[in-house]
Image: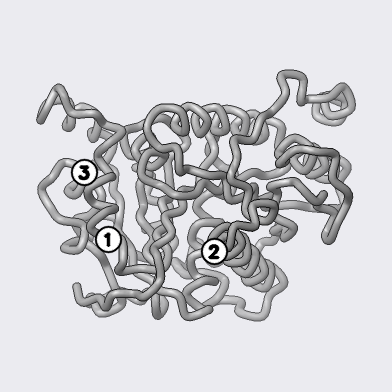
Amino acid sequence: METTNTPFETQVIAIGNQKGGVGKTTNTVHLARALAERGRKVLVWDLDMNSGATKHFGIPTDAFMGTFEVLVGDEEPLNVVVTNKEEGVSLPDNLHLITSRRKLEAIDETLAAKDKFLARSDVLLGPIAALRGRYDYIFLDTAPNATAPTVASYKAADWFVLSAIPDPFAIDGLRDALLDIQAVQRRGNPRLRILGVVLAAVDERTRLARTLADYVTGAFRTGGAGREGEAGAAEGSVRFKTIINRSTVIPTSQKEGRTLFETDPQHKVTEQYRQLAAEVEARIAAARDGVTSSAPAFSSQLPADAVTPELNEVVNG
């Protein structure tokens, strides 16, 4: 694969939640695509055995070597990066992919058999180091469980984006993911920071969606009471101001193996992902300039009683 070094420092962003079906892969793919549209050089690394990101780009899961071969040490990451120069591949300009396939189900057993002393949390460190300087952004699309690639993503990433939908179980998944982030910050990756929480598949007409959005705004914050700001997000909250609405165009584009930027470039949701990409870049730029209020360099804390009686009433009633 041919690449040219970028003059910018590579930002490695893991996207996840300890629950499936929360828009994690959809957010990963479309945020990466939006940044590619902005002229950034972006790599999406599919670390999920379900191969969601791979399928979203219309690539057969067994067409290329990818994540499994890199993590077991059989291939270097640059040798398995897929670009739109590959025959039969139609990736957007500026966007590359490392694919996943079902074989990844056996990664933990394979790693243990290869070296019983290997720390599975370290398996991405070398590959990510080899890719730094070649991309502006590397997105790690994680699985909703603690497989070796997921655990390793926490150790290798600079940033973590939490993905959620208006569903009480998805919010519980945020809490679990947050605890994992805090554990990794203490035990091996102190530079890992929460970039933000994305709320997706939101129907703002429903009481549940509004209540859970308010809950996320209040529970994930830098500290202090804050005040309500643009798009309903409170100042001091790590929730991104941009909310991704529910729309049938998303599953339609997934079935076609393309993103909304190809199937519906002028759609409201496509524009929301453009706005989200702008927020991401603004937060990272603020962190680089030392403005931590815009890019929180902290360990967010969820109180034990964060799920309020009002929230329980909406969820259960």
Answer few, some or many: residues within 10 Å of disc 2's Cα (few below 14, many 20 plus, some between 14 and 19): many
Circle 3: residue type:
Leu
The label number, if any, that marks residue 131 in the structure image? 1
Q: Can the viewer see residue 196? A: yes
Residue 109 location, x and y as percent?
20, 27
Q: Please determine whether, in this image, residue 215 is positioned above or below residue 61.
A: above
Instruction: For marks 3 and 1, give the one nearer the viewer.
Output: 1
Is residue 99 shown left or right of residue 71? right
Residue 277 location, x and y as percent?
59, 67
Label 3, label 2: how far apart the Cα atoms are:
25 Å
Q: Please determine whether, in this image, residue 45 is positioned above or below residue 125.
A: below
First along the sequence among labels 3 and 1: 3
Is residue 221 shown left or right of residue 85? right
Residue marked by disc 2: 31
First along the sequence among labels 1 and 2: 2
Circle 1 sits in a helix, a strand or a loop, which is it?
Answer: helix
Residue at figure coordinates x 76%, y 25% from the top left: 306
The label number, if any, that marks residue 71 in the structure image? 3
Answer few, some or many: residues within 10 Å of disc 3's Cα (few below 14, many 20 plus, some between 14 and 19): many
Residue 244 location, x and y as percent?
69, 58
First along the sequence among labels 3 and 2: 2
Q: Please determine whether, in this image, residue 7 is positioned above or below residue 79.
A: below
- What is the quadrant of residue 92 in the picture? bottom left
Q: Can the viewer see residue 245? A: no
Circle 2 sits in a helix, a strand or a loop, which is it?
Answer: helix
Label 1, label 2: how far apart the Cα atoms are:
19 Å
Viewer-nearest residue: 227 or 256? 227
- What is the quadrant of residue 246 in the picture? bottom right
Residue at figure coordinates x 55%, y 48% from the top left: 161
Circle 3 sits in a helix, a strand or a loop, which is it?
Answer: helix
Residue at figure coordinates x 71%, y 38% from the top left: 220
